[in-house]
Image (cartoon, coloured by chain):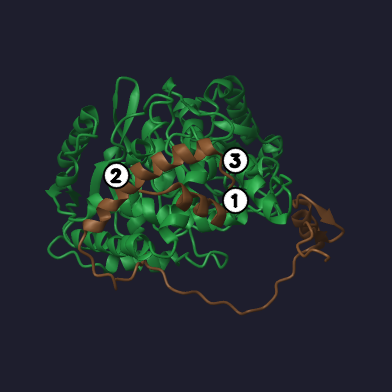
Chain colours: A green, B brown
């Protein structure tokens, strides 16, 4: 049968594969054909892997085995068996280049698999290629890539968002059925919003970061970019779980127990409550069409039986400031490993010490250097208390505000980003303007709570995203509301 | 708000070479970023508050060496820009006289 990639979901593709309507090889080839046609304009992929079809062949053998054992109804195989996906360039796949879109890792070959890769491989997913990103995930537009900007599939003059811009664009251009991204301050959700796809940042500790290049270790999470909320749930369930190699991971049952243990006085009824911090939505920087589309989304939720309630998050306006202290501090520590000695680029200097200076200067881009220096500044003696310690104290206050709000509501809703996709080059000269892109998304990284961006409308051709945040470990609430909203049940 | 001398010190600490042009633009950018995050100084906070995220606790493991396969060792060494046999080669650190 002819494969309709545009309307395909993981669930549909799985059913077709199991029914024998098409093979994984045919499906993989269909994606490779789209990539060959569209990638030169969009630049979502940095590299397409030459062994994707080989992996698809193996998946087809497994699918045939399962199909032949028709008596065992329960064994339908993994939902991801034979499903082609894309992975962000900061996630390690053994033997393949992982460059984080940086010159310093241009020829670096991963020596082991990230835990998320091992998990997807076990499920039988097919890796199509690695996707473009802001260098070391630092940016909100994929303009900081050393390998060129990723363009928005809806309008090639505009950015795809970032830092997981390539992953979002790959799904939006029908160049992959799902993609993995990383999210430190909104890097999955904001590009998902710009490209009209679903993007999930799981609870801190839900998904292992082993084998993913660290940016801000107290903030980073790995998550899926998909076409539907159902698909996001499928991928999340495949990659989540405790991992001995990442000490911050929590047992999934512990996460769920944590979520259900929280008190919700008076609202055990079936009518879920969405909290809206209206006091935080009035700023000048927020696009009017985004707000309009947000209000219509709330109306739709009301029609579906949800209650919408105003909430107060007294310290939420400080979240972005906290982020731009904590994140660079952690960046400056994490980026110290690029020394030109053990792996990656080496540029010769006058002596051993000078090698570091020359290598890092040649290999690291402007934004990365800016954040390393900023992080070194806020951590240096004399400033540590004023910046880093104070930021951590405010971080705790923001988390407490959310925990308090979640005693009365099940979800918190905001727009995902203050505007739809902006023009390429529009914000590159003003770091603070670029940082303000993260205003709604950073809070979930600050608090460690799960958040999802789901498409909720558009301005002209440009998609707009709605962000829902839930309690720690309560991804289920995000999936349930998201499916309701997109009529996926 | 930040002086050239301070910036140069930060660059030395973080092992990054900066050109004069870099310094000029970085100082400007630092000023606008610091002016933004400095608003945090107005927030009344209890400074003894501990920064914690989510449901995270200390994780311990036995202090034992895990072996690496010869193939993986070779892969790891191969990523080094310069190697001699099973060693990663670096420039001499201590002068002879």
Of residue A457 and residue B63, the one placed in the foreground of this image is B63
Quarter of the figure with residue A27:
top right
Residue A418, x across and y down, in percent: 28, 36
Q: Is residue A427 left or right of residue A405?
A: right
**Mark 3 and mark 2: Cα distance apart in space:** 27 Å
Quarter of the figure with residue A83:
top right
Of residue B96 and residue A324, the one placed in the foreground of this image is B96
Residues tagged 3 and 2 counted as in contact (Cβ below 8 A): no
- At mark 2, the secondary structure is loop
**Mark 3 / mark 2, whichever is N-terminal:** 3
> For the residues carrying marks 2 and 1, which lies nearer the camera in this image?
2
Which residue occupies 34% across, 24% down?
A: A462
- At mark 3, the secondary structure is loop
**Mark 2 / mark 1, whichever is N-terminal:** 1
Which residue occupies 36% across, 35% down?
A: A193
Quarter the N terminus of chain A occupies: top right
Q: Which residue is mark 3?
A: A102
The answer to whether dots 3 and 2 both sit on one chain is yes
Q: Which residue is mark 1?
A: A117
Residue A66, x across and y down, in percent: 62, 47
Is the residue marked by circle 1 packed among few (<14), some (14-19), or many (20+) residues within 10 Å?
Answer: many
Q: Which residue is mark 2?
A: A440
């Amino acid at each position: 049968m002819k494969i309709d990639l545009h309307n395909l979901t993981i669930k549909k593709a799985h059913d077709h594969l199991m029914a024998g309507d098409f093979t994984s090889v045919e499906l993989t080839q269909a994606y490779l054909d789209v990539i060959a046609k569209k990638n030169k304009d969009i630049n979502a992929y940095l590299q397409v892997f030459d062994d994707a079809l080989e992996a698809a062949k193996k998946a087809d053998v497994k699918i045939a085995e399962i199909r032949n054992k028709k008596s065992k109804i329960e064994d339908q195989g993994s939902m991801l068996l034979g499903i082609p996906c894309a992975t962000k360039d900061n996630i390690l796949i053994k033997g393949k280049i992982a460059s984080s879109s940086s010159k310093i890792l241009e020829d670096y070959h991963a020596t082991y698999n990230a835990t998320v890769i091992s998990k997807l491989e076990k499920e039988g997913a097919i890796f199509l290629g690695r996707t473009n990103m802001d260098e070391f995930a630092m940016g909100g537009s994929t303009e900081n890539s050393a390998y060129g900007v990723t363009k928005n599939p809806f309008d090639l003059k505009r950015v795809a968002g970032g830092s997981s811009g390539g992953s979002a664009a790959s799904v939006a251009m029908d160049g992959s059925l799902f993609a993995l991204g990383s999210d430190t301050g909104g890097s999955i959700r904001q590009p998902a919003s710009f490209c009209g796809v679903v993007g999930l940042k799981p609870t801190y500790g839900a998904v292992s970061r082993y084998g993913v290049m660290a940016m801000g270790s107290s903030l980073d999470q790995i998550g899926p970019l998909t076409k539907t909320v159902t698909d996001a749930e499928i991928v999340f369930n495949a990659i989540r779980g405790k991992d001995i190699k990442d000490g911050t991971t929590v047992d999934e049952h512990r996460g769920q127990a944590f979520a259900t243990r929280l008190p919700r006085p008076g609202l055990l009824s079936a009518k879920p409550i969405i909290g809206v911090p209206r006091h935080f939505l009035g700023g000048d920087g927020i696009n009017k069409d985004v707000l309009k589309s947000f209000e219509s989304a709330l109306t739709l939720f009301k029609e579906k039986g949800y209650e919408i309630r105003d909430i107060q998050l007294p310290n939420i306006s400080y979240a972005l400031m906290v982020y731009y202290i904590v994140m660079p501090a952690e960046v400056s520590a994490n980026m110290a490993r690029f020394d030109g000695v053990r792996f990656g680029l080496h540029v010769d200097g006058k002596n051993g010490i000078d090698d570091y200076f020359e290598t890092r200067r040649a290999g690291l881009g402007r934004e990365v250097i800016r954040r390393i220096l900023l992080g070194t500044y806020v951590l240096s003696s004399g400033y540590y208390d004023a910046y880093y310690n104070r930021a951590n104290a405010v971080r705790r206050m923001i988390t407490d505000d959310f925990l308090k709000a979640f005693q009365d509501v099940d979800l918190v809703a905001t727009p995902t980003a203050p505007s739809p996709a902006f023009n390429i080059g529009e914000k590159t000269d003003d770091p603070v303007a670029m940082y303000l892109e993260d205003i709604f998304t950073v809070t979930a990284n600050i608090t460690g709570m799960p958040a999802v961006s789901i498409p909720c409308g558009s301005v002209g051709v440009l998609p707009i995203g709605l962000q829902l945040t839930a309690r720690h470990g309560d991804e289920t609430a995000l999936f349930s509301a998201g499916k309701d909203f997109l009529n996926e049940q | 708000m930040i002086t050239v001398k301070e910036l140069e010190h930060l660059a030395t600490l973080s092992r990054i070479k900066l050109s004069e042009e870099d310094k000029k633009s970085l100082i400007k950018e630092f000023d606008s970023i610091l002016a933004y995050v400095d608003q945090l100084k107005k927030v009344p906070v209890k400074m003894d508050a501990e920064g914690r995220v989510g449901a995270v606790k200390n994780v311990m493991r036995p202090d034992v060496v895990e072996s690496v396969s010869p193939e993986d060792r070779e892969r790891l060494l191969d990523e080094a820009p310069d190697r001699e046999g099973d060693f990663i080669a670096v420039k001499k650190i201590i002068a002879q006289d």
